[in-house]
Image (cartoon, grey):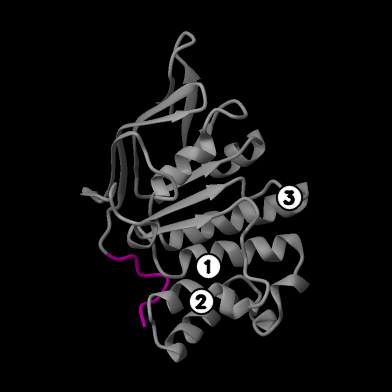
Amino acid sequence: MTSVHEPEHLPRQLKVDGLSKRIGDFVLRASFQIRANERAALVGPSGSGKTTLLRLIAGLENEDSGRILLDGTDVTQLPPGARSIGYVFQDQALFPALSVLENVTFGLRVRRVPRRKRELEGMVWLERMGMASHASQSVMRLSGGERQRIAFARALIWKPRLILLDEPFSALDREMRGVLHRELMELHQAWPVPMLLVSHDESDISAVATVRLEIKDEQEGPLHVHRVT
C-alpha cells in the first residue's frame, strides 16, 4: 500500500488554456496555470462563474472552447471519473447511508481497490485526522467540522492529480475554520498537487492560498481570470 506521505509522479500542473463558457448573458474566459505545491484562490463577485469554472475543470459541465491539461495531458474530452480530480463540494455531498469509513474510501471502491486494502488506507487517513474512533458511525452523526474533515479525506485518499474546493469552510464557525485551515495545509503538504479554492471569505484565502486568481470584467465585456500573485 502506498503511504499518504509518498507523492508519486510529481511535479503536477494544471493548465487552463483559452477556456471559454457562456453563462447567461456573459462569457467567462480563462487561461492560467497552477503548479504543484501551489494553493490558488479563485475570487470574484457573486455570480461571476467561480463554481462554474471548477465544474468545467472537473468535467461536470462542458466548455464552449479551450483546453484543460493535467500534467501536460489534455483531459478536456475525458469524463469526470477519468480526470483524476478530487472535488470538495460546498455542501460536502457525503453519502448518508454509508459509514464514515465507507465515505472516506468511496473513491477507492469505485476504482476497484480490494476491500481490505481500502479499509487499511481509510483508517490511516482517519487516524491522521483524529477520527479513527468514528469509523463505523454514520456521517449524519458528525458535526459540521467533522463532516468537512471526511470530505477532505475522501477527496485526497485516492491521490488525485488536482484538488478543487468550493467554499469548503462556509458553514463553519471561526474557530473551526482555523483548525481546518491548518489541517488542509498539512494534508496538502503530504500530497502536494495543484489546489484551486473558491471562497468569499478573505480570512480563508489569506490563511490557505499561496496564489490568487481574480475574475474581472473587461470593460463590460467578457469576464477574464487573471493571476495576480
**Residue 123 x %, y %:** 55, 82
C-alpha separation, residue under disc 3 versus residue under disc 1: 18 Å
Q: Residue at x 73, y 50 (%)?
A: 171
Q: Disc 2 marks which residue?
A: 105
Q: Is residue 227 visible?
A: no
Going from N to C along the chain, the mark reached first, 2 or 3, is 2
Label 3 secondary element: loop
Closest to the observer: 180 or 134?
A: 134
**Nearer to the camera, 216 or 173:** 216
> For the residue marked with disc 2, what is the amino acid?
Thr
Kind of element beneath mark 2: loop
Q: Quadrant of the N terminus?
A: bottom left
- Neighbour tally class for label 2: few under 14, some 14-19, many 20 plus, Cα within 10 Å: many
- Please give the residue where the numbered disc 1 appears in the rendered image: 154
Q: Are marks 3 and 1 in contact (CB under 8 Å)?
A: no
Asked whether, in this view, residue 53 is left or right of residue 167, the answer is: left
